[in-house]
């Protein structure tokens, strides 16, 4: 069916549906203690969000910068767990940071649902308890008889909770004591249930030769949504139906057989439209229309049809944009101003998107990868403002409300996030925060790092979308975008003589030079230093000796020397697995690897000697930094080396250039 006013269906090319059934039902049984070595994001309680790399297709080896490495089949390149946003983003008064305010924790169950109203926050968990929080402290609570709490919505003094056992319970706040909540009943009411059960036509056939009353959900209630203007409550369920309830008398007005698989989300939108998303991979539109003395919801159109499950929906009421999260980690969106034609894809997560929320010009996506992406929509384009990290389990639910107490009006939103780590975190979010990345309809992962330029007035970023970008530090202006390689650009370094070196998963190392062209400048390709079958994973330049080093996924380190006109100088063989990072200082170069070791090499008279093999980490060594040891009394021990690993530790080493040799590597 096609409707010119609404738009056309978008067929997504995405990953096949995951085999684990629980993820398809937007309820992945991912334990909160999942080993963090599987993720390139970090676990931290710091209040400043940091950018990180997110693989568009974590199941595809082609997308991996180290696809020949047995470790971490997504990417070794996330920012260091100790890194933070730029100083401008942290301290500039015009760009307030998005940060953590506090955490709410009670050792009783995983958090599955949230709802905020005024100064109160309601949380639901698999302990069957609904907790009420005020000013980040527990205010009161009440408990249902059965079924974990999967959804909460609030309408005036009434609180509606959806449960795993298929029931919708109705609660009321006491007018005398707001800490007391009384249960009014269950949907459907006992009276309506008995009345419907008498008539055989009110039964529907379900699995295992069962017949159930049409007005009652016989499987878990997955989501709830309110249309307060019409006084209606919508409930979706894993029983493949959406039910419509009248709030005033708790009567079920309609039961809609909406999808061919579990309905994971329902939202009441603009223009009287209802949007539903399902594990069958589709998003559908429904409209409430008058029929005789009553009303009926009529199917209008399918917005999306894909192989992977739709796990979450959200509508931005001010901008009239519909957002859809999926089990492949993508967020699709449609805009009313474009007649609900497909607007594009937001790529920010490596694992399933489990929840969405929208407010103002912002949309928030929470994921099984334990992160929350904050997106801002402006002039039709979406920008990733922050990646909020801190949860140690999948982020299962989000709620957002305006921050009425904030002195700075650039920070108008309070975001609540509930996780399977049993905690609720409270964030203050600004619409004016600096951008991490911009998502066009084609999308694309964010930049991975901004290397030092040693005094140059510009910086360069590497990215997994095969582009290099040159930025002017003074005004943060992008001066140029360079199509550098045929695969992911894993490293870029600013070197000597105005040269730029780039390394890629396509196995090549290339040289570029910044040259004047008219009134501006442009980076021109000079030559290809290296072309090999395995991925280039790291680059480093020794500025004093003018030597370029290249680490690869085969564990080797190649090098080229300026004094020999950048001809190939030789190979350093010290690792059994992929080299993940390099650093150079003085006459030393450091190589770190998936094999959990750090090799310290000394260059002398054109030959490289392995001084030490540092072993102590219990996981792949992914980051390092080196600085001169100004406090050392022994001038033979002049370097301090910092190494970061997937074992969650940072180790500090004192390194001497005069250490005894282990071996000598000649060409």
Image: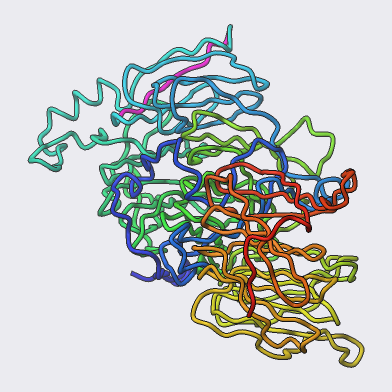
Q: Which is nearer the eye, 245 or 660?
A: 660
Q: Is the N terminus in the top left, top right, bottom left or bottom right quadrant?
A: bottom left
Q: Answer whether residue 88 is visible to the viewer in this image.
A: no
**Residue 54 locus on image (x, y percent):** 55, 59
419 vs 463, left or right, is left
Give the residue displayed 43% in from the left and 52% down from the top.
Answer: 275
In the picture as drawn, the residue positioned furthest to the top comes out as: 176
Up the image or down, 348 lies above or below 550; here it is above
Give the residue displayed 82% in from the left and 64% down from the top.
Answer: 586
Q: Main secondary structure of the magenta part?
A: strand
In the picture as drawn, the residue positioned furthest to the front comes out as: 660
Give the residue displayed 49% in from the left and 23% down from the top.
Answer: 158
Q: Answer whether residue 339 is visible to the viewer in this image.
A: yes
Q: Is the C terminus in the top left, top right, bottom left or bottom right quadrant?
A: bottom right
In the picture as drawn, the residue positioned furthest to the bottom comes out as: 518
Q: Indicate the quadrant where residue 437 lies.
A: bottom right
Q: Which is nearer the eye, 662 or 172?
A: 662
475 vs 209, left or right, is right
Give the residue displayed 66% in from the left and 63% down from the top.
Answer: 610
The figure's colour scheme reads: rainbow
Up the image or down, 401 lies above or below 267; here it is above
Q: Which is nearer the eye, 134 or 522?
A: 522
**Residue 6 locus on image (x, y percent):** 47, 66
- Is residue 192 shown in magenta? no
Q: Indicate the quadrant where residue 399 lies.
A: top right
Q: Which residues are magenta?
A: 167-175
- Is residue 172 shown in magenta? yes
**Residue 284 locus on image (x, y percent):** 38, 57
526 vs 25, left or right, is right
**Residue 404 locus on image (x, y percent):** 75, 32
């Amino acid at each position: 069916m096609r409707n010119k006013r609404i738009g056309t269906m978008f067929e997504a090319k995405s990953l096949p549906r995951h085999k684990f059934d629980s993820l398809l039902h937007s309820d992945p049984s991912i334990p909160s203690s999942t080993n963090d070595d599987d993720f390139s994001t970090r676990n931290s309680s710091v209040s400043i969000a940091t950018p990180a790399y997110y693989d568009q297709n974590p199941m595809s080896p082609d997308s991996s910068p180290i696809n020949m490495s047995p470790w971490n089949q997504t990417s070794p390149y996330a920012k260091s767990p100790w890194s933070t946003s730029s100083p401008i983003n942290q301290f500039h008064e015009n760009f307030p940071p998005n940060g953590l305010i506090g955490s709410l924790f009670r050792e009783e169950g995983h958090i599955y649902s949230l709802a905020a109203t005024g100064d109160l926050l309601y949380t639901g968990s698999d302990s069957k308890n609904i907790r009420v929080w005020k000013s980040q402290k527990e205010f009161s609570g009440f408990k249902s008889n059965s079924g974990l709490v999967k959804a909460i919505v609030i309408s005036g003094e009434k609180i509606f909770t959806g449960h795993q056992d298929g029931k919708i319970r109705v609660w009321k706040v006491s007018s005398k004591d707001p800490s007391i909540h009384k249960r009014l009943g269950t949907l459907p009411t006992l009276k309506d249930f008995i009345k419907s059960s008498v008539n055989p036509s009110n039964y529907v056939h379900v699995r295992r030769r069962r017949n159930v009353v049409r007005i009652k959900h016989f499987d878990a209630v997955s989501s709830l949504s309110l249309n307060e203007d019409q006084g209606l409550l919508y409930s979706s369920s894993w029983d493949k139906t959406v039910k419509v309830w009248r709030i005033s008398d708790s009567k079920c007005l309609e039961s809609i057989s909406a999808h061919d698989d579990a309905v994971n989300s329902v939202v009441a939108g603009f223009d009287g439209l209802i949007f539903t998303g399902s594990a069958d991979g589709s998003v559908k539109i429904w409209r409430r229309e008058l029929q005789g003395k009553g009303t009926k919801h009529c199917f209008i159109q399918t917005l999306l049809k894909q192989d992977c499950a739709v796990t979450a929906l959200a509508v931005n009421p001010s901008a009239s944009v519909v957002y859809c999260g999926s089990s492949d980690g993508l967020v699709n969106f449609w805009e009313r101003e474009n007649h609900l034609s497909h607007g594009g894809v937001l790529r920010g997560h490596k694992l399933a998107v489990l929840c969405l929320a929208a407010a103002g010009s912002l949309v928030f996506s929470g994921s099984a990868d334990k992160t929350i992406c904050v997106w801002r929509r402006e002039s039709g384009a979406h920008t990733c403002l922050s990646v909020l990290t801190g949860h140690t389990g999948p982020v299962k639910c989000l709620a957002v409300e305006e921050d009425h107490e904030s002195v700075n009006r650039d920070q108008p939103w309070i975001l609540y996030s509930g996780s399977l780590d049993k905690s609720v975190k409270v964030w203050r979010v600004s619409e004016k925060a600096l951008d991490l990345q911009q998502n066009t309809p084609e999308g694309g992962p964010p930049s991975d790092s901004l290397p030092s330029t040693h005094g140059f007035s510009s910086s360069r970023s590497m990215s997994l979308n095969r582009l290099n970008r040159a930025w002017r530090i003074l005004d943060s202006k992008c001066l140029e975008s360079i199509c550098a390689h045929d695969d992911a650009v894993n490293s870029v370094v600013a070197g000597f003589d105005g040269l730029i070196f780039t390394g890629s998963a396509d196995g090549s190392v290339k040289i570029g030079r910044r040259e004047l062209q008219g009134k501006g400048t442009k980076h021109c390709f000079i030559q290809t230093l290296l072309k090999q079958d395995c991925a280039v994973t790291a680059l480093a330049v020794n500025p004093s000796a003018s030597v370029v080093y290249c680490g690869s996924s085969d564990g080797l380190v190649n090098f080229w020397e300026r004094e020999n006109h950048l001809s190939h100088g030789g190979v350093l063989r010290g690792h059994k697995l992929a080299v993940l990072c390099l650093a150079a200082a003085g006459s030393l170069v450091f190589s770190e690897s998936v094999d959990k070791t750090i090799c310290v090499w000394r260059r002398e008279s054109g030959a490289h000697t392995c001084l030490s093999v540092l072993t102590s980490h219990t996981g792949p060594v992914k980051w390092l930094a080196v600085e001169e040891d100004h406090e050392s009394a022994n001038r033979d021990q002049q370097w301090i080396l910092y190494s970061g690993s997937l074992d969650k530790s940072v180790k500090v080493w004192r390194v001497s250039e005069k250490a005894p040799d282990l071996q000598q590597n000649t060409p």
